[in-house]
Amino acid sequence: MNERLMQFRIGMFVIVAGLVLTMMIVWFGESPSLLRDQGYIKVKYAEAPGVLEGVPVRKSGIRIGEVVAIAFDEQPNQPEGVVVTLALERRYNVRKGSSARLTRSLIGDVAIDMLPGTGTEPIEPGKTPRDAPFIDGEVAPDPSRALAAATKAFESAGDTLASIKAAGDGLAKVTKSADNLDKLLTQWNGTGQDVSGAAQAIRRFIDANEGDFKPAVASLRQVAAKLDKTLDDETQEALRSGIKRFSEAVARIDAGIADLQPALKDLGSDVKHPPTTDIGQAIRRFNLIASDLELLTSKLRGVDGRLNTDGTLQKLIVKSELHDNLNQMAISANRALIQLKAVLSSLREFADKLASDPTALTRGALRQ
């Protein structure tokens, strides 16, 4: 009986030890960074909008690390800024002269891209964040600001197109009126003859009223002199300055439209054309997200266009039995965790007693 009891206790000890080992493997598996060989590099930015711990670090589109710490640069005699500490896997080399560019997408996602350096030797990362070397950092332009500038440019372009359309409508009216040109010439010939007679009548009228014309001409001279005084040098200079500013504003608008040509080219190009600007890449990503959402909704719909209640995800949403089963599973898991905590507490007490007195196990078994 004593030998069987001892075998039972040893078997229970082996089982509990196996459970503890399994739980430790699971815990360490949730933090893969503890098992990776990592080095540390610090990057200084003038500002770091949206950077948090856990932001991915990529090189040529491949994730090579993440952000582990963020702090203000408080070094004396140095401009203010932000120091970001990166944890990089040592199997990926970063050459000297490399820089870390902080990029933000149109929907607010933040990432750090390692730009290739001009050197040939790799940078030796620090073993701890304290002895990590510094590299240069830069912040990419915010795509939301570029989108706002593009919106203003589109509004200006819309006004210009409206003016062009109005001019085109005027030319169309003139073209429609060309059919009446012959009639106009005929009427003009008759009018010329009438004007000749009218000129003779005007001549007779001027001869009859020549004495009244001289005071009228003098009055016109006085009006011209007053107008000349009104348009003095200061007024003329202000008028020139206004025209010059208007010309500069038009030149700036033309320059802004020229700067937007690459973005407009991406917006008007074929879907197979790779985008070359941040706006084009943002639109491409938005199209991909919309395509994924359309694919997801098509899977949720049936042939008739309504919700397909036979799918697994639809059943989870529609049928209450699945929700009840999930609740029961959660309650059972909670109870199991509570019991497991009690078992671990007993196991900890057993381990403490065994560590303080290793002979207690055999002594208790022999006493039985």
Image: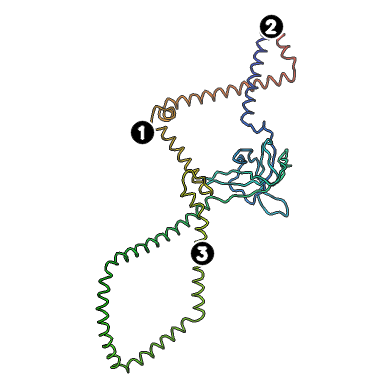
Distance, label 3 to label 1, CA atoms, is 56 Å
What amino acid type should be assigned to the residue bearing mark 2?
Glu
Cβ atoms under marks 1 and 2 closer than 8 Å = no
Helix, strand or loop at label 2? It is helix
Q: Which comes sooner in the sequence, label 3 or label 1?
A: 3
- Residue that appears at 48% across and 26% down: 326
Cβ atoms under marks 2 and 3 closer than 8 Å = no
Quarter placement of the C terminus:
top right
Q: Which mark is residue 251?
A: 3
User: Where in the figure is residue 252, as x and y percent of width and height?
Assistant: 52, 63
- Along the line of sight, the residue nearer the viewer: 347 or 90: 90
Which residue carries the number 1 mark? 306
User: Where in the figure is residue 40, as x and y percent of width and height?
Assistant: 69, 40
The quadrant in which residue 61 appears is top right
Eye-nearest disc, 3 or 1: 3
User: Where in the figure is residue 226, as x and y percent of width and height?
Assistant: 44, 85
- Along the line of sight, the residue nearer the viewer: 69 or 118: 118
Q: Which mark is residue 325?
A: none
What amino acid type should be assigned to the residue bearing mark 1?
Arg
- Along the line of sight, the residue nearer the viewer: 129 or 178: 178
- Residue that appears at 65% across and 44% down: 116
Distance, label 2 to label 3, CA atoms, is 100 Å
Which residue carries the number 2 mark? 3
What amino acid type should be assigned to the residue bearing mark 3?
Ala
Q: Residues within 10 Å of mark 1 (few under 14, many from 20)?
A: few
Q: Which comes sooner in the sequence, label 2 or label 3?
A: 2
Helix, strand or loop at label 1? It is loop
Q: Which comes sooner in the sequence, label 1 or label 2?
A: 2
Query: Looking at the image, how many numbered discs can be counted on the residues?
Result: 3
Eye-nearest disc, 1 or 2: 1
